Image: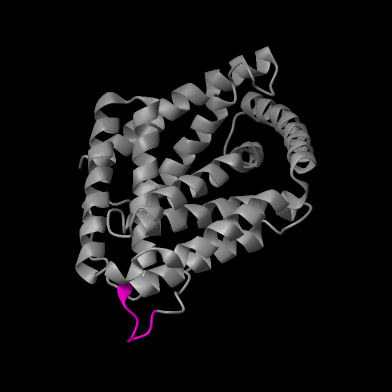
Amino acid sequence: MPPRQASASDSTASPGTALCAYALGELDASLAALGCHGEALHEGVHQARKALRRTRAALHLGDGILGPGMAVLDRELRTVNTGLSNLRDAHALVETLERLLEGKLDGHTRTLIKQVHQTALAARAARTESELDADPDLGRRRELIAVLRAAVPALSWSRLTDSALRIALADSDLRMDQARARAVSTGHDDDWHRWRRRARRASQQRRGLEAIGLDPGQGSPFGFDKHTTERLGQAQDLTLLLDHCGADSPFSLPEREAVKAFAKPSLARLRRQIAGAATE
């Protein structure tokens, strides 16, 4: 999907004004996505969370320039996004297992994944019912996003310049590169997760600048190509599986042990491949 174009990105708009329009467009997209019902709700939550992350990425391009209200807005948007994570995680587990079933698996592993997939479907249904009982139609979340949206134009968008935005993006690229180096060096789960988050933010910020007609430049030499991005997605699927094998897992103890026996070596192998490509 191409970047959402900012309505203010004409020749007379300042880069800050255009970026504000882009952020407002992403918040509108999140509101629309959270209005989905039935089976569409799961994909709606996924799209809403992506739009909220893009909004936050845009805000961080003006960190230190947009004024003190930026930090408050960013914190509240993060809280809303985190509040949707239980719904998203339950659906993401189902999606992960379905992607695995589409791939090549030996007979024993395929039987296991089919079995835990049924468990994940039941867990998703229970989680959805619980979330909607507490917040019917996700109305409370949508009302909060609408309130936050109303506060966005009050930030000091006019202070943003082309050079300030490019400097902010360069800083984001640097943080991504530092996170990459640490993840490759330590191999720790938290460091790999940090690398993925920072790479995602740098990518979202490039998307935002392109949407307002500002060339973001070539970027980090360690920016992800399509192949690496796909591998990181596969690694994230395996990480998600392992995250659902803890004490609060929806799976039985034998299922957990079998899933871990499959996912751990597969994840280690993928990370070695990604790390090798990232250091070439």
x 54%, y 32%: residue = 240
Residue 96 visible in the displayed image:
no
Residue 13, position as x, y percentages in the image: 35, 81
Residue extent of the magenta highlight = 9-15
Is residue 14 one of those drawn in magenta?
yes
**Rendering quarter of residue 98:** top right
State the predominant SS element of the stretch in magenta.
loop
Residue 194, position as x, y percentages in the image: 36, 36
From the viewer's perspective, is residue 152 above or below residue 107?
A: below
From the viewer's perspective, is residue 10 above or below residue 112?
A: below
x 28%, y 59%: residue = 65
Residue 95, position as x, y percentages in the image: 63, 42
Q: Nearer the viewer, residue 189 or 108?
A: 189
From the viewer's perspective, is residue 96 above or below residue 169?
A: above
Using residue 35 as the reference point, say whether residue 271 is left or right of it.
left
Using residue 54 as the reference point, say whether residue 172 is left or right of it.
left
Q: Nearer the viewer, residue 83 or 258?
A: 83
